[in-house]
Amino acid sequence: GAGVSQSPSNKVTEKGKDVELRCDPISGHTALYWYRQRLGQGLEFLIYFQGNSAPDKSGLPSDRFSAERTGESVSTLTIQRTQQEDSAVYLCASTLRSLNTEAFFGQGTRLTVV
Amino acid sequence: KQEVTQIPAALSVPEGENLVLNCSFTDSAIYNLQWFRQDPGKGLTSLLLIQSSQREQTSGRLNASLDKSSGRSTLYIAASQPGDSATYLCAVSPPDYKLSFGAGTTVTVRA
């Protein structure tokens, strides 16, 4: 596809279960971001990947959160032992390069922990 | 730490009126500033990207200005329409690459 693709679009999970969220960036985009947006709030930075460099994980809220990206392709955000406060929309964005270029966002994954 | 503020938080105007949305940021060391639109329950749609060396950028009814030295950007939407109702977010791209977002301005255009 031409845009950033995220799956699933919606996920309902029971508290304590693990979830995996997927982001497929625009082909050729070297930089990839994950953000979290809680209901009625702004975007919260989680993690940043740039090519084969070590990712910037400074925004991950706890060690239950982890993310991987193989090369310049798909990224997976994993949340272990989900808690109700993890309920949010998780947004992924990619850019052609890390600087001076436009960021494109996917439609997000709405995660609900019950 | 970069702080991005958007004023007002919400705005309601009658159809046809021009919209003025403000964004301010505390650290002028940015590479670019981007305006996004977010519809309820949706992702972000890029509207305009202004490079740090530019003063303004235009696309159709949208015009965005950037005063990097004073840490301000303004998004103008001319002749507003009900379809312009959405939340508008600005984001700055600093040297550490982490896009920093404002909390957004929620716009309602009344028919």
Image (spheres, grey):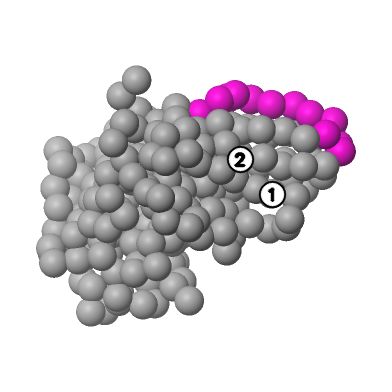
Residue under the point 69% across and 26% down: A11
Query: Vertically, is B85 above or below A31?
Result: above
SS at mark 2? strand
> Which subunit holds the residue at mark 1?
A
Residue occupied by mark 2: A77
Residue under the point 30% across and 24% down: A2
Mark 2 neighbour density, 10 Å: few (under 14) some (14–19) many (20 or more): many
- Where does the C terminus of chain A fall, quadrant-wise? top right
Amino acid found under the numbered disc labelled 2: Leu
* Magenta residue span: A6-17
Query: Vertically, is B16 above or below B19?
Result: above
Q: Position of residue B109 (x, y in %)?
A: 38, 38
> Which subunit holds the residue at mark 2?
A
Q: Position of residue B43 (x, y in %)?
A: 46, 35
- Between B82 and B57, the one nearer to me in the picture: B57
- Between A38 and B108, the one nearer to me in the picture: A38
Amino acid found under the numbered disc labelled 1: Phe
Q: Position of residue B66 (x, y in %)?
A: 21, 65
- Between A27 and A92, the one nearer to me in the picture: A27
Lateral position of residue A59 relative to residue B63, left or right: right
- Where does the N terminus of chain A fall, quadrant-wise? top left
In the image, is residue A7 part of the stretch drawn in magenta?
A: yes
Lateral position of residue B66 relative to residue A11, left or right: left
Badge 1 vs badge 2, beta-carbon distance below 8 Å: yes
Q: Are marks 1 and 2 on the same chain?
A: yes
In the image, is residue A100 part of the stretch drawn in magenta?
A: no
Residue under the point 34% across and 69% down: B95
Residue occupied by mark 1: A65
Q: Judge whether residue A84 can be spotted in this image.
A: no
